[in-house]
Amino acid sequence: MKKLFSLKKLLEILRTEKKKGKKIVFTNGCFDIIHIGHIRYLKKARALGDLLVLGLNTDSSVKILKGKDRPIMSEKERAEILGSFEMIDYIVLFNEETPIKLIIKIKPDILVKGADYKGKEVVGTDVVKKFGGKVKLIKFEKGKSTSALIKKIKKLK
């Protein structure tokens, strides 16, 4: 099943799903090197609603956020891998530093981010709450991150 959609097509699909009463969960990220922390996070996010929409940073936005040596894998590869996960229903790429434009258009019932955002402003909180939605923070797996993996790999040299 194809899960990567243009924003226009995704919005058409979500309109239909919302009419059926489906609860839409939205999260986003780079997902550069998939690891167990990602899997556990995405499963928990999906459990919060009926459909999980993943906003995936494009290669150019990953570069802005993570530096010139990133991403490790192309957006096409990352989308294909993530599209194989049963807990993800839809994927949409975004080119900006934040997914605020997606959040405004998708209007998710639940916006999910990692608990590392505790005490920080989660982009889109005001928008989601304005539409009656909620923001949920999911606990990260300690020591499970792409950056930690890259450091570990570099030590193997």
Image: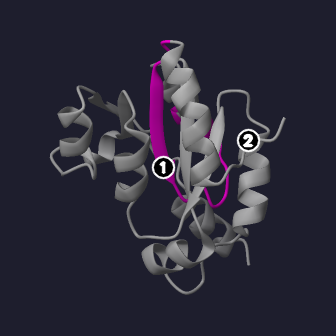
Q: Is residue 57 left or right of residue 88?
A: left
| Amino acid under disc 1 | Asn
The quadrant the C terminus occupies is bottom right
Q: Position of residue 121 (x, y in %)?
A: 19, 51
Q: Examine the rendering and report whether any part of residue 41 can be seen.
A: yes
Is 72 displayed left or right of 49 in the figure? right
Extent of the magenta region: 21-41
Q: Nearer the viewer, residue 24 or 70?
A: 24
Res. 68 image quadrant: bottom right
Give the label, 2 or 1, closer to the camera: 2
Q: Does the magenta stretch include residue 31?
A: yes
Task: Give residue 88's position: percent from left, percent from top.
Answer: 65, 33
Query: Where does the N terminus fall, quadrant-wise?
Result: top right
Residue 102's disc number: none
Q: In this view, does 91 lie above or below 21?
A: below
> In the figure, 48 relative to 157: above or below?
above
Q: What amino acid is at disc 2?
A: Lys
Most foreground residue, 59 or 73: 59
For label 1, count other residues whose C-alpha is less than 10 Å away and answer few (under 14), some (14-19) or many (20+): many
Q: Specify the farthest residue to the top.
A: 21
First in sequence: mark 2 or mark 1? 2
Residue 151, horizontal then vertical, whole percent:
57, 69
The residue sitting at 61% across, 67% down in the picture is: 150
Which type of secondary structure does the marked residue at label 1 adopt? strand
Q: Mark 2 points at which residue?
A: 3
Q: Residue 28 carries which label?
A: 1
Which residue is most to the right? 1
Check if mark 2's residue and mark 1's residue have beta carbons within 8 Å.
Answer: no
**Residue at screen point 64% across, 39% down:** 90
Give the spatial CA distance, label 2 vs label 1: 15 Å
